[in-house]
Amino acid sequence: MAWQRAAQVVYEVVDGEALLIDPAGVELITLNPVGALVWQTLDGCLDAGGLAEALLPSFEGVTRGELEADIEAFLGELREAGLVSEATADGDAGR
Amino acid sequence: MGWSIPDGSRVLVEPGERPRAGEVWAFCDPHGTVVVHRARRPTSAVHWRFQGDACVHTDPPTTADQLVGRVVAVRRGDRRLAPLRWGRGAGLVQRAPRMAVATGARASRRLRRARVDGAGPWALDTAAVVAGTVVDVGGLAIGLRASDAGRADAVVGMLRHAAPAGGVEQVVLRFDATELPVPDGPPGYDREGIELWWPSPGLLVVRERAGLVARATADEIVVGGGSVSLDRPFRSVSLFALAHVLAHHGTQVLHSAALLVDGRAVLVLGDSGAGKSTLALAALAAPCGDWRVLGDDLVALHAVDGVLHASGIARPITVPTDVVPDPPPGSRRLDGDPRGRLELPTGPVAVGRYPVVGLIEASLDGESGALVALGAGDTFRAALRASPSLADPAFQRDVFALATAVTKLPAWRLTHDADAASRLRVAAERLAEVRAHIGAESGG
């Protein structure tokens, strides 16, 4: 299942961290540099495995399986917060 | 991976008695839920304030019996993440030589002098609003209308020092007793007694807890309804409505003060009660008279050729009573203000639009009287928190663009002196340091 950033979520990357406003416009959410990297890699075409494959060269000391599991969990949190959704045919809707 | 401490995380705490500003603590909220947030400066000897790093607002005051302990580690899955340290990456600013010290009495005299010498020639009055007049607000010509003297007074209270506008009015602000409906369904934003709806593109509906409702489009603000006290409810709804209207015209409003030095503006951000107006007052009372005030609470920002420019929204300056033990004649207590502030006869003493060259975040946290450099992330967050349009879907991207532009400015966090008697003097000294730094950066 490919993932995309939710269309209405506005974000900016500042000093490596991604700063987002939740869909209700009330909460400021900060993704740390690793989370920000995943966030920026979301392109509407990649699933958790694809994201892990793309990001694996950026990390040392982690296996592809570990990375995919972490990304999967992270995407679950983002989905729960309304920040990502399953990709549509239009691809990435964010920003 | 993820934001600082996700819900459901397990935290390791150690016992402690008094949270220090910047530490992460676990405590029980009034519903018995354990919350892990960062401590800010105590609001009194027995109350602490906390705020999540991802939260726009602070938590309600917390008492000692609600405290669980200081968080020393966070466990999430197999990963252990150290809580982020407050002020990470910040360093002390090189301090300029101390300037001459003004005593409280001398500062008060300077304040009076500023009122006499510097106040603009404009003073909006009730009769003018009832008759219909046009003023400049953030570069927009806004026609003011009120159905009666009481409502006109509330408009004057908000815009007393606004300059008259020439030419044709671009926006109308009308305040009468008509009860305005709010949309069906829950509001899109509901915080601190303010509810916001965006029922259709370009339309904002604001309801304040006392009952006033405002509807704002690109060219009209209509405020309707009544309440026992009109001043404060009108200020609340018109702040969001004005921000919405100005955003339609390419100008962003920030809940910010703006100070002028050497023909350039320095923004002063900070949560309510953090000391923006106190810093504005310190600027007016500064020994050398170098600083002027564009606004102490609301600022309109507009990019001109890629450079951010600020103009004030000319509300009267309001300050806590403890920093003005000897109020100038004409001061009055702000009607219905829970903080019991004093409205000074002094309005913003400068008009016009000025390039923005720096930013100060007024703060209650940190070392008393300290001025420290502020990182881009903290500056960005401060700008977002200061925007009344942050929740407005039509303008969120503009707000982010503004916050991004603000991160390019030199920025500092100024913690006001804990002693009210010396607060103005210390703030004036810190302003001198900021001026020296800005001058050095620009070669001035």
Image (spheres, rainbow, N blue to C red):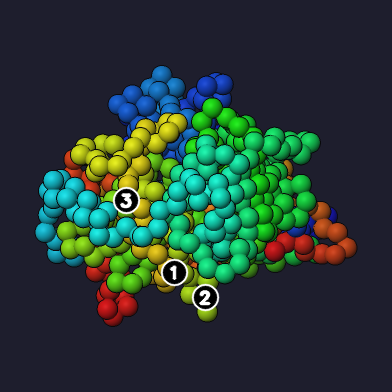
Give SS at disc 2: strand
Instruction: Identify which amino acid the numbered label 3 is placed on.
Output: Thr
| Disc with the residue nearer the chain's start (2 vs 3) | 2
Q: CA distance from mark 3 to mark 1?
A: 20 Å
Find disc 2 in the rendering and name its residue.
Answer: B304
Residue B227, image x and y in percent? Answer: 57, 29
B216 or B401, nearer to the observer: B216
**Could you tell me if residue B345 is visible in this image?**
yes
Residue found at x 17% / y 50%: B109
**Could you tell me if residue A39 is visible in this image?**
no
| Disc with the residue nearer the chain's start (2 vs 1) | 2
Residue found at x 45% / y 48%: B125
Q: Are dots 2 and 1 in contact, CB under 8 Å?
A: yes
Instruction: Identify which amino acid the numbered label 1 is placed on.
Output: Arg
Find disc 1 in the rendering and name its residue.
Answer: B353
What numbered label is drawn on residue B346? 3
Residue B184, image x and y in percent? Answer: 79, 36
Residue A82 drawn above or below residue A61: above
Q: Are dots 3 and 1 in contact, CB under 8 Å?
A: no
Instruction: Identify which amino acid the numbered label 2 is placed on.
Output: Val
| Disc with the residue nearer the chain's start (3 vs 1) | 3
What chain is tagged by disc 2?
Answer: B
Residue found at x 56% / y 50%: B131
B391 or B366, nearer to the observer: B391
